[in-house]
Amino acid sequence: MTDNSISVPPGTPVVVVRQTPARVWPMRLLVVLLIISIFINFGQYTAYQGYVSDRSPIETFDSGDLSADDKIALIEVSGVIMPPFTERWIETIEHVTDEDDVKGVVLVIDSPGGLVADSHQIYRALQELAAKKPIYVAMKRMAASGGYYIAMGAGPEGVIYAEPTTWTGSIGVIIPRYDLSGLADQFGVHADPLTTGQFKDSLSPFKPLTEAERELWNEIIQDAFDRFVGVIDEGRANLDEEQVRAQAEGQVFTAQQALDNGLIDQIGYEEDAVAALQQKLGLASARVVRFEQPPTVLDLLLGSAQEPDVNPLAQFLQTQVPQAMYFCGWGTIEGAP
């Protein structure tokens, strides 16, 4: 056997080099990558927290004089009035209310309406805005039911414009309900809920409404209907309550019909409403800007700022919740009984 040892004179410094086993380096590399990943995720989380803590609407230039200090704000409410968009619209309205350089607002509506409570929340926020700054309304494709309700937030001094092809009106309340009891009988399906009172499952689709149940829900939607009529009576100086009720059968009006019935003031476009408001404000020049809420992380993941959270279980449970609506949709009949 060959001796590979090396003789070293006494007192000579010796440097010993140890060779690290090859399998140690991958482990060390993984540890380094893990540390880097932690720092990156921490940075992203910090940025996300800063992002969600500041939900101020984004202001973008639309038209007019870019160098003008005085602004006319465009706030657009489009689509069905429902969460989570209700909160975003209200935040935008409140932001514009506090903006000193915004002298007036054009509320742009393209909506068939939506939930009763949400429509009223937006209306109330607009009332507070109208107490400080004039609001004109520009209706686009549709401003019906809840879409018309929120237009009343401009107050009696607000001027309402509708495009020639706008559909509006549809003054009424609806609680969507389907009677599937006949179909259930055919398939041998019978609902047998355990309740603490006779009205707890009164809107179950698996049984017809009793007279007592129908009377109960009629009182509820009548309350919402009366509030709708009152809002129009207050918002339209040219109409009294009797005139409003005469038009509150749930029907949709064309722009010309709405003008003839006093529901709107002018047939025109968004730019006409802006020009009229600028003249009312006495501004020689104005910067017309839009205020929109920034998209949330969920919106970015879904690829749309107008797409609500899609959860099949939540959607199914939501269909079981009684919801009074100021809504104009295909296949619905509106109007208080």
Image: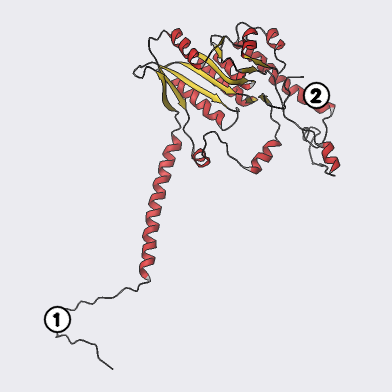
Query: Could one spot residue 132 in this view of the protein?
Result: no
Q: Is residue 296 above or below residue 263?
A: below
User: In the shown orientation, is residue 285 left or right of residue 305?
Assistant: left
Q: Is residue 244 among what the camera can see?
A: yes
Local crowd size for mark 1, using a 10 Å CA cut-off: few (<14), some (14–19), many (≥20): few
**What is the three-letter code of the residue carrying label 1?**
Thr
In the image, is residue 90 above or below residue 26? above
User: In the image shown, does 182 or 225 lie closer to the viewer?
Assistant: 182
View extreme (top): residue: 238
Corner quadrant of residue 188: top right
* Image location (x, y in percent) of residue 128: 52, 17
Write the residue at 68% across / 39% down.
Answer: 317
What type is the residue that disc 2 sits on?
A: Glu
Residue drawn where x is 66% and y is 7% of the image: 240
Residue under the point 46% across and 11% down: 275
- According to the picture, the residue beneath numbered tag 1 turns out to be 12
Image quadrant where residue 329 sits: top right
Disc 2, SS: helix
Local secondary structure at mark 1: loop
> In x, y percent, where is residue 70?
38, 15
- Residue 152 position, x and y percent, is 59, 15
Alpha carbons under labels 1 and 2: distance apart: 108 Å
Q: Is residue 261 above or below residue 301?
A: above
User: Residue at label 2?
Assistant: 215
Left-right relation of 247 to 194: left
Specify the quadrant that holds the N terminus. bottom left
Image quarter of residue 281 = top left
Q: Earlier in the sequence, mark 1 or mark 2?
A: 1
